Amino acid sequence: MKQNIRAILALLLCAACVVCTAGCASTDTPDGGSAEQQTPVGEAEEEIPAEEPFVPSLPSDTAATVHVAGHYNNFEALEAEFDRFNEYYPDVELSYTYLDNYNGTIEVVLSGAEAPDIFFSYPWMLEREDLKSVIETAEDLSDPSLGLNLSCIQEKLLYRDADGKIPILPVFCTTYGMLVNEAIFEKEGLNIPRTYDELLSVCGALQKAGYSSPMMGYSRGSFMLFPLSFPYFCAEIQGNEEALENLNALTPGAGEYARDALALAADFLGRGYIDMDACGALENDYQAVILRFFEGDVPMMLATAGTVSGTEKRESLSDAYIAHPFKYSYHPVPSTDAGGYFLNQLSMGFSVNRNSENLDMANEFMRFLTRTEELSRMAQVKRMVTPCRDMSFDGVYTSFGALSGGHVIYLSDVGLEDAPDQQMRRAGTRICNGSMTVDEAVAAFGTLEN
Amino acid sequence: MKGMRFGKRAWIIAVNSLIILSVIAFVAAYAGKYNRDYVSTRVRAFEDRTFAEEQITANYLRGEQQLCDSWAAYIRANSLTMEEAVSFVRSSLTNNGVTAAVLYADTPEMDGLSASPKNGTEDDYSVSYRQIHLFPEDGIGGGEGDLPNGRINITRAYTNPINGIQSIAFYDRVTVNEGDAARQALLLRIVPTTLLEKQWVFPKEEFQNAEVSLIDEEGNYIIRSNSFKNTNFYEFYKSYNTTDLAGIEALKDTVASSTGSLVMRNSRDQECLVAYTPMQDSEGWSILAYLRMEDLGTGSVDWLLIGVVTAGLLLLLLVDAAVMLNFNRRLRAAVKEADAANRAKTDFLSTMSHDIRTPMNAIIGLTAIAEKNLDDRDSVSDCLRKIGMAGSHLLTLINDILDISKVESGRLTLNAADFSIVDTAENLVNLSAPMVKEKNIRFNFRTSGIEKEWLCADQLRLNQIYINLLSNAVKYTEPGGSVSVSLKEEPAEEEGDVLLTYVVADTGIGMTPEFMAKMYQPFSRQTDSRVNTIQGTGLGLAITKQMVELMNGTIDCESAPGQGTTFTVKLKLPAAKRKTAEMSLPDADVLVVDDDEVLCETAVDTLHSLGAQAESAAGAEEALEKILGRHREGHDWSVIILDWKMPGMNGAELARRIRQEIGDGVPILLVSAYDWTDIEEEAKAAGVNGFVSKPLFRSTLYQKLSDLLGREASANEAEDDNSDLAGMKILVAEDNDINWEIISMLMQMNGIDCDRAENGQIAVDTVRDAPADRYDLIFMDIQMPVMNGLDATRAIRALPVGHAKSIPIIAMTADAFSENVAECIDAGMNGHIAKPIDINIVLKEIRKIKENQ
């Protein structure tokens, strides 16, 4: 009997050891890889202070409703945060609503009878006169009385209005790059290109191997090679006050500052590594691009981080991918001999409606979110880039974590406003569709219409 | 053996555990099945409720559509312009949040006029739905009347560009006049989803927390409740459940075409039940009802049931095990006791065999010796005396065996009758005197407080108690030791009762605590090298305790090895109504001389109670002084009572001195603790006139003093003089020749004539035929051939002759139990004498009968 008891105890101890060992193991990521800690880029290299755990400031039995409105059709990452917040405040009902024509309706919605407590906001809203009332509706998140730990967020992503207030809590960042089918590279014995020359060489090799369009991207009415040219463009003008001033003012001749970037696009386009017809068949720059990439015959697909965010969920929607799954990753597009750029750009943020009937709880939810743990979790679920100082790149973004120094650029540092950004896109679109040469586009820069 | 026992125990535990596990498994399986059935029933009910909800929803939507259609019909019928149409619908609106718009349908701009102004304006009614994407980019196509009648035309939920409120819109095609031309347009009846949600809720009575949504064929929510995440149901499903494209397509087909339910996981990884049913009037649309499985009412009850059953079974097992262990322990103890009892009985039988053979050996041996020496009268006499002693011992043995047999069978009953406690005490003293004298033991017997002489109890058993304890004390006391007996009478709490306390203290061998723990068990005898020759049955104390308890009394014992033993028996007995005979000695003037101060005081008190004058003297010197003093005064004591043993001068010497000093005028009574036969000659020579034994009971003193003072004592009979019985005639019904010979000889020796009846029938016939005065008495044996004694007695009492009913019949039988006595009395007998017969008892009975006649 005693031996049996000892045997049971031994088994229990073994089980406990196994459980503990499992608990110490690496955390699985959505793509099945391990969450390897990467060296933070840019300012993330500074020492990051430890954060205090979230402590509710309101009675836990407070009943309230918090309504978030935005332009994402689906926002599982936020809904997961609702559930986590409910662990502290079980009587708070949180909901998310997709608004049609968000940019066109948010002002009306905020002034309506069903105004949200929290709404999506973007840096460009700060510059738009027609959306001035939207930003004015937003709570100043830098108000110390709110208790938000904004220090966990990269300073360069915190946008301030004219009064120095911070109306937007950065939630997701985006960047530009290319999705790489690693299986093809492995099959063809190629390395993922790190420089522009390598890119050209790889494209040539792939084309010889039978891949008619080694590079693809969404081209309908947009600048398909924007992920190649725009980071390069930003790197070129960063710190050039004169260039920036002229570009933002769209002064005549400012297009010269964009020449190199546009020429880079034209050069690559001219190499014939892109099948424009195949790219033109892509109906949109999101699901269509992803599903085309999952067909498995596209070595490289130009995409924004926003597009990458939809990849995991759509793996199950692709019969080809289900039949022949492959490893893929997201990389900066190599535009120079020194490599590509990580252009870090705020994709979306949250603002609190200061006219909210549930202002205290809305601010409490924002205080809950403004922590590395929660924001990074959301970014991980959404497969976007986290705005936190501790970026901890993982999964498909690993190669971005390897960049440093001048190859990490913050759009806010560049200081480029929306107008020259749009001109750059329009010029590139025209070059890609062959309606303008580089010279013509440069000359017309500042006057190009959509 | 131990291994076998352990193996059996393990086997029993294993079987019990198996049974418990089987029961638990059965309960779990049953609970699981019950749970599944319950869930299945609830799921069906939920599906049915969802189907019913579809009817309600359809009715509601149909009603809204009809309102929209009626507006459209009016606009169409009256060929209104855009402004007129909007003005008309505006006038038709109530203030419940519902609004309307008319949009041009022939342009991708989808612009038009709203019935209410844009937020923040008072007169801006323009509106565009281009960016809302409610309709196909190329318009809804067709012409007026293309939308089939009865169909519900409804948009998904969208953000109303006029007021920013999430709404759905019912629509119908209209034409509006614009100059001479007619343009196609859409009329929208716009209902806020909040308003819809208030009216369109899942009934909470049956399924609390249930929610309902409406989706189109692609899964886009037309109406969405809170728990339905994403903007598309299938996106919601994909987000938290594993599936593939084919699975989603199959799910779409199922949801759009049938009524049923599915179980899925929500954003919190909880299991949820989603029931679906297609909307009949809207192709591709489906109603979805949502409920968390835990809200379906399953889960905890089963575990509670299993837990309770498990705990109950374990508790039962533990209780059973405890009870079984207790039973086993008690069984082992009982077996041990039974083994011990068997051993004790075996030992007892062995002892009895020895103890019975010993006196039998004496009887047989002495009988043989007597036969050989018939001519030697002294030798024969000695043999007969010893045979009698051996017989008596044998009888005691047999009586004890009978008693313990009755004790063990619980048939020992008491026959209460009036008796004299004084007689009992005297009897005790008389019985113990020979033993005490033989063993040279100091014996002291004291009584106190005997106010009520006549009590009511089973005297036989009381004597047995007292004699047992006293004879034990004497038996276990070595020569030179002492035995003290105290008998005290006190009034009891209950009126009419007395408390008799009987204390026997000896200086004998005492008892060990171990022996005291079992001394009341039958067949127990204290063994000691000093007393190994002590004879006894080992039944005395057992019988004594049983009898004391039967008489509702208590018996206590204090003892230590080598320090003697003290037994205390307390009995509460009722006093008899019978009064002590009137005794008075008013003329007596008595001097009591004893060194025992207590005895002196007791005696003086007793004499005072008899009306006598009395004084005491503590010793011979004081006594002589008082006697001489009185003599000089010419006022001698009428009687002087002297103790035999006194320090300095004993009773005989003092008597001699008294006679020397005052002559023979004053009677002297000598007190002795034992019988006085040894000192009788010396005492009488010294001038003693009579003898009396301690203790000095009232009746004893009265009788002795009366004798000395010349009074008649009523009960003063000469023990050996049975001449008064001579001439009596007795019929003896006895089938045994030897017994007949013994009784007839004993009777003849006392001048009593006997006739024999060999059985009961002869006895009956003899009585019937005999004259009335032929027999004074019948001795009736019980067990006889032809007719037993009981039947014979009944027959005699039933005889038609007069004397048959009154003639005394005394049972004379070896059936010695009390129930046998009771049977005899019930049959009509007048008394009972147990065999072997004691001639003195027989004569006493005969005398009683003669006196009654």
Image (cartoon, coloured by chain):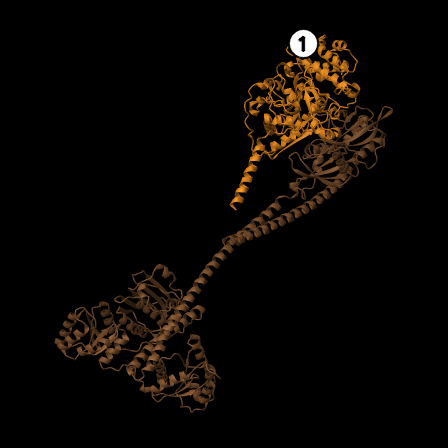
Chain colours: A orange, B brown
Q: Which chain carries label 1?
A: A
Please identify the quarter of the rendering in which residue B200 is found: top right
Q: Is residue B336 left or right of residue A157?
A: left
Residue at image mark 1: A243
In the foreground, B785 or B264: B785
Residue lying furthest front: B372
Q: In what quadrant of the picture does the C terminus of chain A appear?
A: top right
Q: What element carries label 1?
A: helix
Q: Residue B94 at x, y = what percent?
A: 74, 33
In the foreground, A180 or B291: A180
Q: In this view, does A33 lie to the left or right of B131?
A: left
Residue B248 vertical placement versus B686 (above, below): above
Residue lying furthest left: B632
Q: Residue A42 at x, y = what percent?
A: 60, 17
The answer to whether any part of residue B791 appears in the image is yes
Please tell me how many numbered marks the rendered image carries.
1
Please identify the quarter of the rendering in which residue A222 is found: top right
Please identify the quarter of the rendering in which residue B669 is found: bottom left
Q: Residue A33 at x, y = what percent?
A: 64, 27
Residue lying furthest right: B180
How crowded pointer 1 is (Cα within 10 Å; few <14, some 14-19, many 20+) is rated as many
Q: Residue B779 at x, y = what percent?
A: 41, 84
Q: What residue type is labelled 1?
A: Ala
In the foreground, A348 or B625: B625
In the foreground, B32 or A252: B32
Q: In this view, does A320 lie to the left or right of A12?
A: right
The answer to whether any part of residue A67 appears in the image is no
Residue at (36% x, 61% y) in the render: B516
Residue B202 vertical placement versus B463 (above, below): above
Q: In this view, does B754 lie to the left or right of B704?
A: right
